[in-house]
Image (cartoon, rainbow, N blue to C red):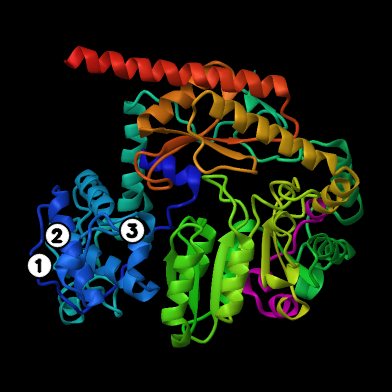
Amino acid sequence: MELLNQVWNGKESSPATVVTSDHKSTVSSPKLSQASSIATWLVSKLAEVLELDAQEIDIHRDFTDYGLNSIEAVNLSGELENFLGHRLSPTLLWDHDNIEALAEYLAEYVAKQPTGNSQAHLETSSGRSIPETNGHISAKNGLIPNQDAEKLDNQDIPPEYHHFHLYPEYRKLQLQQEEIKALGVNNPFFTPQERVVNNTTQIGGRELINYATYNYLGMCGDPVISQAAKDAIDLYGTSACASRLLSGEKPLHRELEKEIAEFIGTEDSIVYVGGHATNVTTISHLFGKNDLILHDSLSHNSILQGCILSGASIIAFPHNDCQALDKILQERRHQYQRVLIVIEGVYSTDGDIPDLPQFIAVKKRHKAFLMVDEAHSIGVLGKHGRGVGEFCGVDPADVDLWMGTLSKSFASCGGYIAGCAAVVEYLKYTSPGFVYSVGIAPPNAASVLASIRLLKAEPERVALLHQRAKLFLELAQKQGLNTGTSKDSPVIPIIVGDALKSVQLSQNLFKRGINVPFMFYPSVPQNAARLRFFITCNHTEEQIRFTVNTLAQEVAKLQQDDSTQTSSLE
């Protein structure tokens, strides 16, 4: 189940690095299968870090409420890694709601690890034991304490340290794939989509109504957009063939950046080759060790990775909670130089929208920077699709960094940062993800440029998208389906609670001609597993009505099966 979740939802971080620490816990190591023992360790350690009595630590309280900064959180993850003897993500505390949830996850995780995955007890291929490291990694050789290094030669290096197929992380992946097979679930990953994906798709020669992709405005596959890409290939070829800083610049690039800036209402913009890379390189480059970054607790993986790489202190504030954010800044603002607040225009798991004017007010009050990730809101929100800024009626200049992706409303690939001329110029000359990368390919740039211009000429696409999303949401709610906090956006979850039930529901809908993915913990809260529907302007009213009716029927069947099983047990 974890594998399905990681790949689909982008919440899991990349494989962890080992965090060293000289501090040794005073709590005894638990039996790794006991979540309660792990929870006890976490309570003790968190109390120590925060200088509180253990009685003041509530295992059900959200981690974000404790106000841990990035260094404290990563160090705590490192000590927990040493304590358990297994590699863990440095963002572990941000990936789980509270101590109870984390302890349960860890107990299950450790129990599933292949033999030999413990870092505290390693054995060489020759069968000789390597002295215990207690999780301490030497800067000299990366394996054992310096004082023991001379006792070993290269024959003592465990095979999992120099063979990819023996990586503990890879072996974990294999186990997860076996779990999927054991559930009787068809592998949902890398399913070939055999033609243009829009309101419908083709899989295995079969046409299905499609809610799994975010071609919100139907630009992908539009003849005007396709022709623009073809024309760019004829003129410039298929690649920029160099960094734009040197010899990869095309007239098309500046034309696109000016168009994006004008569309959003900023002085300038810079276009990157990837959306994920846009967040990672921008955040990590603009902020550093003397700074503070505060991000929404539901932030995308690309935001988290940028925060971690920056070296800044990081605090996740409760989802869409301006008051909690304001309180954190009141307490901590003067401890740092620059402060960045990062939110999203539409949150991709819940389909809800932040109160942007309130965030702007907090940003101004505390003299911070504000960054808005518009991956799912540009082209979608506002009368003309200009994003959450237009939707909320704010001055674009009140947001310092407007980030967006080019793969959703704009039918291409890449990302952008729009803002004042100074920040754009600085990024163009110094941002690693721009300077040391090839420029966006001409056909991709041309696709975006044509999409923005077509959107300006046909704003009815946005109006129709709004109508279709509203229809789906209203019909679902009339059927008694749980749509969570989704409102005014084309991202609509149907929350069913149980993780396995969400998988079964997705598979059953697929059999009836509907393609929609599932999501579950830790990308969404425990007991809030769901299906996520992306609505497009090309979905017909007939398709939406059929989908909601079919969905309600399948949900009812699952509920009936649950009732039957419960009765048989009584």
As drawn, the label of residue 62 is: 3
Q: Work out which quarter of the rendered image holds the C terminus and state it.
A: top left
Over which residues does the magenta segment extend? 424-445
Q: Are the two marked residues, 1 and 3, in contact with CB atoms closer than 8 angstroms?
A: no
Q: Indicate the amino acid at tag 3.
A: Asp
Mark 1 or 2: the one toward you: 2
Residues packed near mark 3 inside 10 Å, few (<14), some (14 to 19) or many (20 plus): some
Q: Compute the Cα span from label 1 to label 3.
A: 23 Å
Q: Are the two marked residues, 1 and 2, in contact with CB atoms closer than 8 angstroms?
A: yes
Residue 65 falls left or right of residue 272: left
Q: Indicate the amino acid at tag 1.
A: Val
Is 519 contained in the magenta span?
no
Residue 102 falls left or right of residue 503: left
1 or 3: tag closer to the N-terminus: 1
The prevailing secondary structure element of the residues shown in magenta is helix
Q: Report which residue position mark 2 lands on.
A: 40
Up-down: is 411 above or below 236?
above
Local secondary structure at mark 1: loop
Q: Work out which quarter of the rendered image holds the N terminus and state it.
A: top left
Query: What residue lies at 80% left-to-right and 61% top-to-bottom?
Result: 260
Residue 126 in view:
no
Residue 336 falls left or right of residue 466: left
Local secondary structure at mark 2: helix
Which quadrant of the structure image shows residue 344? bottom right
